[in-house]
Each structure stands twice: as C-alpha cells, then as structure tokens.
Amino acid sequence: MSDIILEAVDLHKRFTRGGGLFAKATTIHAVNGVSLQVRRGETFAIVGESGCGKSTLARLLLRLIDPTEGSVIHEGQDLTMLGAGAMRALRSELQFIFQDPFSALNPRMSVETIIAEPLRLHTSLNAAERREKVAELMARVGLRPEMADRFPHEFSGGQRQRICIARALASGPKLVIGDEPVSALDVSVQAQIVNLLEDLKQEFGLTLVIIAHDLAVIRHMSDRIAVMYLGEVVELARTEDLFTAPRHPYTQALLAAIPVPVPGSAAGRKVLGGDIPSPANPPSGCKFHTRCPHATALCRTTRPVLDGKDHQVACHHHQTLPAPDLPLARASRRSPAAEARFALYRAASRDAELQIDTTHPNNPTNSKETTQ
Ligand SMILES: Nc1ncnc2c1ncn2[C@@H]1O[C@H](COP(=O)(O)OP(=O)(O)OP(=O)(O)O)[C@@H](O)[C@H]1O
Ligand code: SF4
Ligand SMILES: [Mg+2]
C-alpha cells in the first residue's frame, strides 16, 4: 500500500466573475498550479492569509468542485476522471467538515437523521442497526444519545461541530478534511474539538487535512504544513522545521507576527507590509515580490518553482537569505501560552462541555441540562 493517500498534481482553479454588455469579466486564479502529497495517517495543515485559496484547494482535493486543470489522485485513481456514481461511492472514504457548524446542518432534520444519512447511503445497515450506530457515534463524540431526536438549533456551536464530526465519521472515512473546523467556535470550545479530532484520528486511523488560521492550533496538531500565498504553495515542510527554520520570506513574516511570551522578544511584530494583492490582478514573477523585503529584479519577472524534497520552498533566493530572528523558534514546541491553553482545554470538565447551551435564544428547553 502506498504511503501517499491523496495527491494534487498541478491543480488550477479559475473563477470568472461578472462580464456582460458593459462590464468586463474578471478571472480569479484561486488555485494556481498546486502539487502536493498527503501521506497516510498524517495530519497535513494548510495555512495562509484570507483569500489565498485554502478552501478552494480543500474542495478540489475532495472534488467538491472540479479543477480547471490538473488532477487529484486518490489510491492511484484520478478523482477528476470519475463519473458521478463512482464519486458518490467514494464519498464514504473522503469526508469534509465545514467551518460553520451553524449552516452545515439541515435545521429541519433531527440529529439522528443527520448522522444516519451517510449510513443509509453507504452501508447496508437496517433502521434498528443505524439507530444503534448513531447512538454509538454520538457517545463517541461526547453527545448524549438521548439527544438524537433533537434538532440542530437546540445545540451549542461546539455540540453542533460534534454532530458534524459524528456525521463525517459515520461512513468510516479514511481521510477527513476540516476547513477551519474550530474557527467559528469560542476559544474554550475550540480546544475540546481539536482534542476530539486528535483522539478520533488515532482511534479510527484517519488521515486529516486541516485548514486553520490559528498557528498555535496548527503547530499543536499537524505533522506537515503547506503555506499558501495567492493560490500557490510557497513552502511545504515538517511542522517543527517550518516553525523553527522557515525559509520563505512569507512564512518568516507570518511566524514573526505571532505573539510569543519569550522575555525580551519583540513579540507579535507586524513585519509584513502592504495588503495582499488582488487575486484578479496578481503581481508578475514571484507573487510575493510586492511585499518581500528581499525582492530583486529576477523576482519581479520570473516565477520561482517549489524546490526541495522534504522541505520545499518557492523562492529564488532562499539559500542565501539571512536566517530570520524568530522568538518562536526559541520557544518550546508549544509556547507557554499555547501550552497553558491546551492544558486548560484538556482540563475543561466534560460535563461543562456537554451542557446544552441554555443561553441560546433558540433553545426551547431553557433548562440547565447536562449529559451525565
Ligand atoms: N465560487 C467562487 N466564485 C468566485 N470566486 C471565488 C469562489 N470561491 C472562491 N473565490 C475566490 O477565490 C479566492 C480564494 O478563495 P478561498 O475561499 O479559497 O480563500 P481562503 O484562503 O479559504 O480564504 P479564507 O481564509 O477567508 O476562508 C478568493 O479571491 C475568493 O474570492
Ligand atoms: S522569490 Fe524574491 S520576492 Fe519571492 S519570496 Fe523569494 S526573495 Fe522574495
Ligand atoms: Mg476559506
């Protein structure tokens, strides 16, 4: 069995907007020639500023949208060549968790119906067996099975994301992609979900692809990281290598901007000047040259390719650039702040996390209820 579970080969996605009698159509190259490999059993993270193409790439990887060019290879099979029926059958193995658990669940369906849907589509279980499996999955993600007949509005954000996770797990997937699965949640709930995903990954032998804004979460969870800028992967490396010795000036700027509680450090410096250019009119050559302090004439005309084996970088000058002074590199694997945060998360009482959100305006129960 190959070590590679999913591979993107020169993926492109262009969106065209507008166009008509008086307006010119604009084309956005949201994903521009991305090639990467996801290894079986790893947690692979994708990071980058808003609009750089993370969600588009994630959707392409599971063929929720079709690429303009390129292919996605899953277990030796090109997903872009599969017909609708074959792709539907594969959905049981490839699951997606969306950022917003509030809109990801059908408000008219009970939790039982929501979680049982993949079981109905992808397994031969009868109704009683499905009910049993739903109860099992609910218990596994930390929800009381008795809540199965309730509707999504009766749950808090963290609980809804647990429902989404149970639904994703129902069909026994091998690979799960989470597009910012915790960013819509309160900080205290975020870590409970992060911890749950980590536990489930071990238990079910999953491969995880995670998109997250919070670099502390990424460092905590991931084995390897791809950094994207304007539709391109500019650096791809093992997590520790990326955090302690980033080679691309954009990655260096992202990491230098993280607040780090190291005495004497200029923590949280904002070193990245300028706004991210419009993807409808990206800079020539290296797309980062308009913000890069090391840009040369070559950078303005020639696009650098992603180069290297285990630590890949797309920069003409990465071998000669001075090493960045990153307080983060001197901090422990998890900074004291992140360490404290995750300890707090771990310690968060199970009862507290499973409480129904009685403050939620839509909660009809309006009673303090726990899942003892
Ligand atoms: N369906 C679409 N039609 C037109 N443009 C789109 C579409 N989806 C995404 N885009 C554009 O493609 C670019 C990449 O969007 P994408 O959602 O992938 O970014 P992202 O990195 O996930 O951002 P965020 O961190 O804000 O979620 C953006 O400029 C976005 O406006
Ligand atoms: S190629 Fe040039 S502009 Fe691009 S990141 Fe490297 S030094 Fe900066
Ligand atoms: Mg996104």
Image: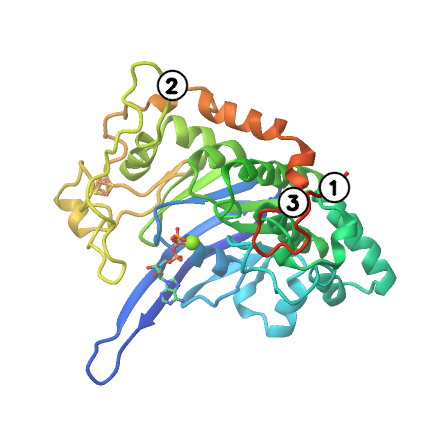
* Residue 335 visible somewhere in the drawing: no
Q: Distance between the residues labelled 2 and 1?
A: 42 Å
218, 190: nearer the viewer: 190
Q: Name the residue under label 2.
A: 330
Q: How far apart are marks 3 and 2 (CA)?
A: 32 Å
Whether label 2 touches label 1, CB < 8 Å: no
Left or right side of 15 for 123: right
User: Which mark is first along the chain, 1 or 3?
Assistant: 3
37, 244: nearer the viewer: 244
Q: Percent position (x, y) of residue 114?
A: 69, 61
Left or right side of 372 for 263: left
Q: Which residue lies furthest to the left in this view?
A: 297
Mark 1 crowdedness (10 Å alpha carbons): few <14, some 14-19, many ≥20: some
Q: What residue type is labelled 1?
A: Thr
42, 357: nearer the viewer: 357
Q: Which mark is residue 371?
A: 1
Q: Does the residue labelled 3 lie within 8 Å of ligand 3?
A: no
Q: Quadrant of ligand 1?
A: bottom left
Mark 2 crowdedness (10 Å alpha carbons): few <14, some 14-19, many ≥20: some
Q: Residue 206 carries which label?
A: 3
**In percent of the image, x 46 and y 44: which residue is there?**
212
Q: Percent position (x, y) of residue 217?
A: 49, 35
**In percent of the image, x 64 and y 62: which residue is there?**
91
Callout 2: SS: helix
273, 163: nearer the viewer: 163
**In percent of the image, x 49 and y 48: which residue is there?**
184
